[in-house]
Amino acid sequence: MEYHRIIALEPLIKRKSLFLFGPRQTGKTFLLKKRFPAARFYNLLLSDVFFRLSQRPHLLREELISQIDHGQPVIIDEIQKLPVLLDEVHNLIEEKQLKFILTGSSARKIKRGGANLLAGRAATCYLFPLVSAEIPGYQLLKILNFGSLPFIYNSESPEDDLLSYVGTYLKEEVQAEGMVRRIENFSKFLQLAALVNGELLNFSNVASDMGMPSKTIKEYFLILEDTLIGHFLQPFTRTQKRKAISTAKFYFFDVGVANTLAGRSHIRPRTELFGKALEHFIFLEIKAFLSYRNDKRQISFWRSKSGYEVDFVLGESTGIEVKGTEMVTEKHLAGLKSLAQEIPLKKKIVVSLDSKPRLLENIRVLPVSVFLKELWGGSI
């Protein structure tokens, strides 16, 4: 099945070159070949292409100059494999006004390899796993168990494919790029990181469980962020009456990947794991929406030291709480009501399994499907 991806690349590439980042198997290559079928394409995952350009980077310039086409971008897939090409790209942008789309599944090597050469000359955008608005008749329970990577969502054996993905990519790929010395330690860390997915991060506790220094654990989490395997969610701390905690959370880029790493399966409604997976899913939908729509609002969470919490805060005007219950009651509103006493929330929303939208104490209770429709419709 093919999906209509929401990300708008064409308007961006008309203005300037761009980096398109996203974890492996999110569909970057397929998307670019479909959107730009006539573009010159260099896939650095192919050994012959990589070897040729790694030995003689100037071949890129010579080949492109020999047949310049200003009507099409030049696509270099997985640019982090060969950051030295950025020098040639920089020159071709400046001297020949060529447009490039540079894809990557890791920003780490690019940052260390000189991406600053393109500062101001290339926009940056991200491709996420499939979102609900891209999947006709999406199945919520399927996503909460197996995630929404395109090849997983279409798979007849999603559990097996996720295990393979975790083994060959999340572990071996990180080791191949020389980011960690002992892959067995990092593999154990990945499992522990998945178990605390969406929880307050305590590097010391994870370090204690691993028998490793806290500094190493912090570096491991930064590796996950740099390789786009996960996202930090920072706390909202601008409250006065109720002092907020300042500890961040961390979410993996895909619900199914987190479940597989944590050894979770058969997640069903009316369980604690269902509520956690639903919260994770809603976070990823909001994160993708803000990126695809170029919405500059920051996403954060709020938790007071006295225990009040709101799952997600957009800017300083929207509070969103996620509950896996089929009937939201007054007891589920405490966090939103407390935050509303601190900042002027224009929108207060509880996302739940309720069958119909309703208003409870001036707080909107929205079924998951209604919330997602309003989110991607631009009204959240």
Image (spheres, rainbow, N blue to C red):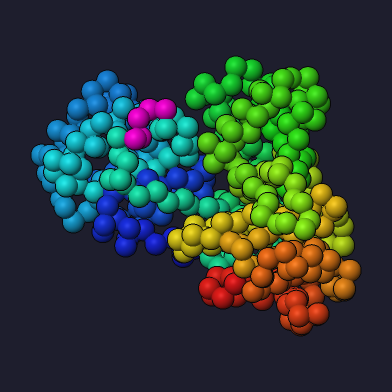
Q: Quadrant of residue 199?
A: top right
The furthest residue to the top: 181
Our reading of the magenta stretch's main secondary structure is helix
Residue farthest toward the left in the current orientation of the protein: 66
**Residue 112 screen position, x and y as percent:** 42, 27
Quarter in which the C terminus is drawn: bottom right
Name the side, left or right, on which 83 lies relative to 213: left
Q: Give the range drawn in magenta.
A: 112-116
Q: In the image, what residue occupies the spot 23% across and 33% down?
A: 88
Q: Which residue is drawn at 41% across and 54% down?
A: 31
Position of residue 100 measured from the top left corner of the image (x, y, whole percent): 27, 46
Q: Residue shown at 71%/29% (left/top)?
A: 189
Q: Name the residue located 78 percent from the left edge and 19 percent from the top edge.
A: 211
Q: For this rendering, which residue is in front, 144 or 239?
A: 239
Foreground of the two, 189 or 214: 214
Expressed as whole percent of the image width and height from the top left, the position of residue 235 reads: 68, 49
Q: Is residue 230 found left or right of 118 in the rendered image? A: right
